[in-house]
Amino acid sequence: MELLIVGGGLAAQRCIEVLRAAGDDRPVTVVCDESVRPYDRPPLSKEGLLGPVDTSFRPEGWHAHHGVELRLGVAASALDAARRIVTLADGERLRYDALLIATGARARALPGVPRAQVLRDRFDGERLREALLAGGPLAVVGAGLIGLEAAAAARALGVEVSVIEAAPRPLAGILGPRAGAWITALHRAEGVVLRTGVTVERDRGDALELADGTRVPAANVLAGIGVAPAAAWLAGSGLDPSGVAVDDAGRTGLPGVYAAGDVSGSGHWEAAARGGATVAGALLGRADRAPAPPSFWSDQHGVRLQCVGDPRGSAEHIAHGDLASRCFELDHHLDGRTTAVLLAGRPPSALRTARARLHTIETITRRAA
């Protein structure tokens, strides 16, 4: 039973590792449009901007040693689910018994500013680091996780940084107003000029002109305005090229076809890791498990932020420390139960406790339902 994986990111790597750890020796082929062996992406917007780092998941030769063929530098162009064939951009056709779609996502371009860089792959990171080292102010459009992490890294290099966000606060789609206010204060204390509730009107070459008439110095521009699933190659396959829907085991609506990671809209690093492991479990015939609470983490100005659960729409309550410090826990309550915990600067034991609390609450809730 041959497994074909399209995409070389975290979901793909975790799927392979779980299979091999279970003693499964089926042939695995990984098709990846990048020319380098699979690597981790989170460091690209963190330490990767401060200097060269090797973010490869495993050492040279690991995949060959574990019976995994890497087909690098070539993209998939079409899926024929009826014949179980994936066609590559060079015309080659690969057959499969099981297929994992893990092509991730593409960074959205910034309209009207063609010179704006994005930060999605290793080569994007290298280009941005070179631009920052060359000097000149950086304008970051979008106060999401990648934009804020890149802003923090640029400040560590001594770069003048402005962050422009259309929403009224940073991370507005993820966190509540109290957490957003804390993040705003953190960045401003580190010298970042953070402008919220405003959009970019036009590019003036050495500056961005905002809708309110303000001009923001910008020798370099980074667009951090979100991503879209990298699934255009699935058009006509029976799967939605705007995002692949899956069940709790990562199964799509097509026989033998699974998906995990950003291509299925799962979001952050933790979700991609779990998604790949979940697909491996399904391939091994293991019983479906209830999905773990969503989570993400971020490093900004020397502070590690970790969030477990879904804080959206919840009321924020201080559970430890205070928002005037860089060490606190913020509980989120909705309909009489804790739905998420945001930790800043807290030890690993605090994260384990938060996970256990939410797991217990979710278990009780499911049983009551």
Image (tube, rainbow, N blue to C red):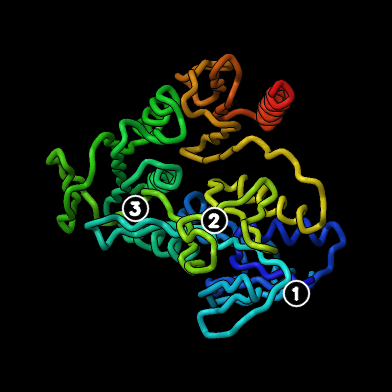
Query: Looking at this view, is 114 or 241 the one in front?
Result: 241
State which quadrant residue 76 falls in.
bottom right
Residue 272 position in % (x across, y down): 61, 50
**Mark 3 lies on residue:** 223
Q: Which residue is mark 1?
A: 64
Mark 3, other Cα within 10 Å: few <14 / some 14–19 / many ≥20 = many
Q: Position of residue 44 (x, y in %)?
A: 50, 55
What's the amino acid at mark 3? Answer: Ala
Q: Is residue 22 visible?
A: yes
Q: Which residue does the image show at 26% across and 62% down from the upper left?
A: 114
Query: 195 or 173: nearer the eye?
Result: 173
Label located before the other in sequence (1 or 2):
1
Mark 1 touching mark 2, by CB under 8 A? no
Q: Which mark is residue 244?
A: 2
Pointer 1: residues within 10 angstroms few (<14), some, or many (20+)?
Answer: few
Q: Give me the C-alpha separation between circle 1 and circle 2.
A: 29 Å
Give SS at disc 3: strand
Task: State the residue at coordinates (54%, 24%).
Answer: 327
- Amino acid type, label 1: Ala
Number of other residues with Cα within 10 Å of mark 2, as a class: few under 14, some 14 to 19, many 20 or more: many
- Using the rendered view, name the quadrant where residue 161 is placed: top left
